[in-house]
Image: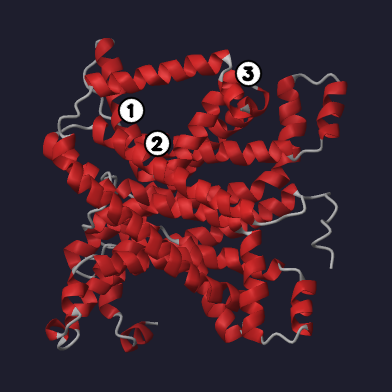
Amino acid sequence: MNSLRSLLVPHRIVMMVLFAAFVLWCALSMRWDWLPKYLPLAIEGIGNTLLLLAVSLVVGFLLAVPIGFAQAFGPFYLAWPARIFCTVIRGTPLLLQIWLIYYGLGSLFPQIEGIRDSVFWPYLRSAWPYAFVALTLSVAGYEGEVMRGALKGVNRGQLEAARAFGMPRFMLFRRVWLPLAIRDVLPTLGGEAVLQLKATPLVATITIVEIYSVASRVRQDTFIVYEPLLLLAVVYMIIAAILSSAFKFVENQVPSRR
Amino acid sequence: METVIDALGLTDSFQLLSLSPPGWGMNLLRGLANSVKIAVGAYLLGLVIGLFGAYGKLNGGPITRDLLAIYTTVVRAVPELVLILILYFVGTDLINKASSALGYGRVEISGVAAGIGVLGVVQGAYATEILRGAIKAIPVGQIEAARAFGMPAMMMMRRVTIPAMLSFAIPGLANLWLIATKDTALLAVVGFSELTLETRQAASSTRAYMTFFLAAGGLYLIMTLISTFAFSRIEKWARRGERPMSGDAK
């Protein structure tokens, strides 16, 4: 009720009317005749974007936990490689990493003896594994840094209590340490997830058909510039809104004393 | 030195990267210079937009605040790549329409200017949020004291608000600068010859992909490490005279 009333202030009503007029103008006077033809491809593209996002976030996070832990508490022979990995991933553009993995590694593989006859060759020739690896490593690098701080910031007393209960080390990590650490950085992780969504269009440059490359293809085929880009921006905004409200929902599940 | 390079089997790589014409080193450095130029320009433009945006969000009327909220939300939800394309097409279209309305012909927009403009608008949205948070973190008493002395708004901004907020804003601004340097790589997709695109051209004409991409990665990394160092010095300078925070005093 309250949020509805705050929307019904005069200047907001005027803005909403203007926005509705803009949407109507877009719908009526811009060209949308290409839409039915490209709709199946666009849906496939959205599916691929979501697939890339989901896989890279999940696998990347699973890698980020040990990387963060190694950075914070590991012996030097684990801490240093983890720290260097995070610095390199965070210090170079993702586009360069994608191209390095796709063109660089991709040019090395054919030199390996007998690889063309192996069962892996059809996969190594497509762009998908390279895209997944590049995006996942990027998540691992950025979130590894987040998890380092999070694991370090957990209240010692909680860990001592768990140890006093006689929990084995792995159970302590799984039941107490990790959940408490994740809870502290949920807002940051939500922000990283949206940043990762915004990074997915980069794999369009290595021939992956996701929603961005569908829009580029419409532009190239039909010479219509603004319409596909506007629709593309709307699609990304919707996905970003869903992502951040999902993270908000999880945050609200965490009981807090504030 | 040369024997070491020889022993490692890197002679070919070093020849490819040498600065004189058979090597492509000069191309990479030219790309790096373009990247730095755009990053600095976009960062400064972003800071100016961010400062006004933050002031608008904190002190502006309801319409200003709502418009700024739309600006920061949209820019932070849409991928930079898409924004770059939209702003690039819209920008060139508008400028060309304006110039033909004024009786000039089509204008050729330089890549550097377009890159700075587009990335600056993106940076401005993030800077707005960082600076808004930093200004809000200033103890109210300091602002009230400045007001009580009768300082005009601009003098208060110059003498009190900006110096007092710096120590809160610098970690965020350092991060933003790193994002600016990395986002210049996105301009490669629209065909602007900054470091990443120069690298790709060099790599695809010599087929030595690994060599060039690793070299470019090294250049970006050097840039990042120098920036991180510089920002930690700046932060120390901005925090001079502050009491150490309870977390640091161990």
Gap between marks 3 and 1, in whole Å? 28 Å
Gap between marks 3 and 2, in whole Å? 27 Å
Q: Judge whether B139 appears above or below A82 on screen.
A: above
Q: Which residue is mark 1?
A: B91
Give the letter of the chain under mark 2: B
| Quarter occupied by the N terminus of chain A | top right
Q: Is residue A84 visible?
A: yes
Given the current orientation, which residue lies at the most extreme top position? B102
Closer to the chain start, of discs 3 and 1, is: 3
Cβ atoms at labels 1 and 2 below 8 Å apart: yes
Residue type, mark 1 in image: Gly
Residue found at x 67% / y 28%: B58
Residue type, mark 3 in image: Gly
Q: Nearer the viewer, mark 3 or mark 1?
A: 3
Same subunit, labels 3 and 2: the answer reads yes
Q: Which residue is mark 2?
A: B118
Gap between marks 1 and 2, in whole Å? 9 Å
Location of residue A56 in the rendering, given as x and y in whole percent from the top left corner: 40, 64
Which secondary structure, mark 1? Answer: helix
Which secondary structure, mark 3? Answer: loop
Which secondary structure, mark 2? Answer: helix
Q: Judge whether A31 appears above or below B234 on screen.
A: above
Compared across the picture, whether A15 is left or right of B109 comes to: right
Give the letter of the chain under mark 3: B
Is the residue marked by circle 2 packed among few (<14), some (14-19), or many (20+) residues within 10 Å? many
Closer to the chain start, of discs 3 and 2, is: 3
Residue found at x 61% / y 23%: A6
> Which numbered dot is residue B61?
3
